[in-house]
Image (cartoon, rainbow, N blue to C red):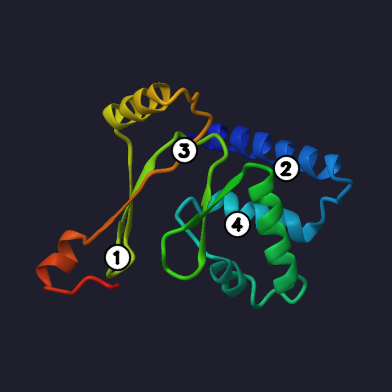
Amino acid sequence: MKKQDTSEQWESFMQNFILFLKGKDLKFTNQRKALALWVFNHHEHFTAEDLVIAFQSERWVSKATIYRTLSLLVEAGILVEENFNEGYKTYEFKFNRKHHDHLICQECGKVIEFENKEIEKLQEKVALEYGYILQSHTLKLFGLCSVCQRKGRPRRP
């Protein structure tokens, strides 16, 4: 991605977040800006704890601010909150990103993102058969990755 493209995406991302905050009568603080910048630059799946660790040396960003800001970013449609059956929430950057689905290893927790046009068409077909118009969906496929299969690891309950 070109630097200009990234700059334009950053501006669009920030404008959306600022407008969302204004709509809720909330301030765009330096803490929220720092957290939004971290999220913008980390498109892998992450946890709240990852953010806490990243900002642990920054005493001006509290743990409570991190959790509140994550909730705001989810509500604004910038992040997606996922549960991959790991006992904690995982977050994923969603802003201006193509839809995709997930394969999740139940042993090691590895997550693979994939796109499949045939699956998308089939989901729409099923929805129409039941009289639904799809507005959104998530698809999570759970199993064992090839590495865990080779290691003979048993499946977690």
* Pair 4/2: label in front: 2
Q: Residues within 10 Å of mark 1 (few under 14, many from 20)?
A: many
For the N terminus, which image quadrant? Answer: top left
Kindly identify the amino acid type of the residue bearing the numbered disc 1: Gln
Residue holding disc 3: 137
Circles 4, 1 touching at the beta carbon (< 8 Å):
no
* Pair 4/1: label in front: 1
Instruction: Locate residue 62: give its quadrant.
Output: bottom right
Residue 124 lies left or right of residue 95; in this view the side is left
Residue sitting at 30 percent across and 72 percent down?
157
Q: Residue 40 in the image: x percent, y percent?
A: 58, 49
Residue holding disc 1: 106
Disc sitting over residue 38 in the figure: 4
Q: Residue 78 in the image: x percent, y percent?
A: 62, 44
Alpha-carbon span between mark 3 and mark 2: 23 Å
Q: Secondary structure at mark 2?
A: helix
Residue sitting at 36 percent across and 27 percent down?
126
Residue holding disc 2: 17
Q: Residue 66 in the image: x percent, y percent?
A: 69, 65
> Along the polypeptide, which appears first: circle 4 or circle 2?
2
> Along the polypeptide, which appears first: circle 3 or circle 4?
4
Kindly identify the amino acid type of the residue bearing the numbered disc 2: Phe
Kindly identify the amino acid type of the residue bearing the numbered disc 4: Trp
Instruction: Locate residue 128: give its quadrant.
Output: top left
Residue 154 lies left or right of residue 56; in this view the side is left
